[in-house]
Image (spheres, rainbow, N blue to C red):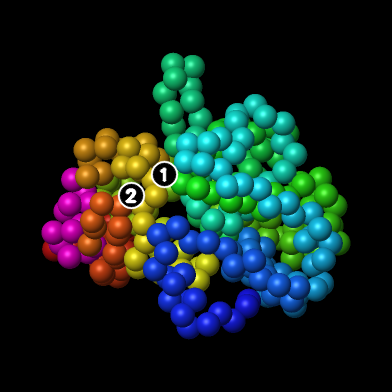
Amino acid sequence: MKMLSGKLTECRLSLHNPIADDGDELHFCSTCAFSDACLSVGYGKHDLSALHCLVEHVGPFRTGAHVFRAGDPFRAIYAVRAGTVKTCVVDKDGKEQVLGFYLPGEVIGLNAIYPDQFPCDAIALEATQFCRFSFPAMTALATRMPALQQHLFRLLSKELGAATHLAADHTADERMAAFLLDLGDRYEARGFSGTQFRLSMARGDIANYLRLAAETVSRVLGRFRNQGLIEIEGRAVTLRDRERLRSVAQGECVG
């Protein structure tokens, strides 16, 4: 990855809306969704010129704008460069169900591989930019690059794992603790702060995603604050004690 100056690194850690560094002819951009997989097996950016040619930068999408809608034909996957996205479905009665949230460096659209159309809506929660990859072209390239193919499989597996966790019988405290830790871990994996970040999604969206009432989300966050686990002001969150939060997420009692 490109070595950034200390000043720029400090700036990235404090941004409420992380922005991708575009890199150069030798270095991946700072939120590249595929760099870790490729670098781990020795692929440099020069080796990935074929993949780079598939990339189309799109956006920014304004807050509330649809990136794609349920039923749209599946032609591409989207890697988030900056901003945050939620995916959701709307039932016949108009009730929305939030399926997930996606941060810089993460990919949306993989759940459309079958039946070859998007099964959900993707909506920008703030000004959001993407790298858009033609999926047929990427699939052809992946047959020549095993690391790329394996990374796509891992991304699919991660989505299935998240759905399984939500389906399990967890308490409100366990779900909220796991949610906050997951966000922190995902930000940290992309080089941002894993303990200080902004909840770009509304409380109602969080509640919907966690299968909780909005009042329950507010009550649990207040309890975590009183217990010294987090600091929260508006949408700005600081994880003060990640180990104790982890204990909560695992169902252990925390005084």
Q: Which percent across, then down, holds residue 142?
A: 80, 57
Q: Is residue 42 above or below residue 138?
A: below
Label the magenta part by its dominant secondary structure: helix
Lateral position of residue 77 relative to residue 211, left or right: right
Residue 57 seen by the camera: yes
Element type at mark 2: helix
Q: Is 91 one of the magenta-colored residues?
A: no
Amino acid type assigned to the residue bearing label 2 in the image: Arg
Residue 197: assigned label: none
Q: Identify the residue at horizontal 44%, vertical 72% (top origin).
A: 11
Q: Which mark, residue 166?
A: 1
Q: Position of residue 129 (x, y in %)?
A: 58, 51
Would residue 157 appear left or right of 197 to someone viewing this image? right
Residue in front for this viewpoint, 246 or 195? 195
SS class, disc 1: helix
C-alpha gap between disc 2 and disc 1: 8 Å
The answer to the question of whether label 2 and label 1 lie on touching residues, with beta carbons closer than 8 A, is: yes
Amino acid carrying mark 1 in the image: Leu
Q: Nearer the viewer, residue 243 or 194?
A: 194
State the residue position of label 2: 175
Q: Earlier in the sequence, mark 2 or mark 1?
A: 1
| Quarter of the figure that contains the C terminus | bottom left
Q: Position of residue 111 (x, y in %)?
A: 63, 41
| Residue 215 location, quadrant | top left
| Relative side of 204 to 140, left or right | left
Query: What are the residue bounds of the magenta stretch?
Result: 219-230
For this view, does 236 lie left or right of residue 27? left
Residue at 77% across, 47% down: 134
Count residues near mark 2 (Cα–Cα under 10 Å), then give few for <14, some for 14-19, many for 20+.
many
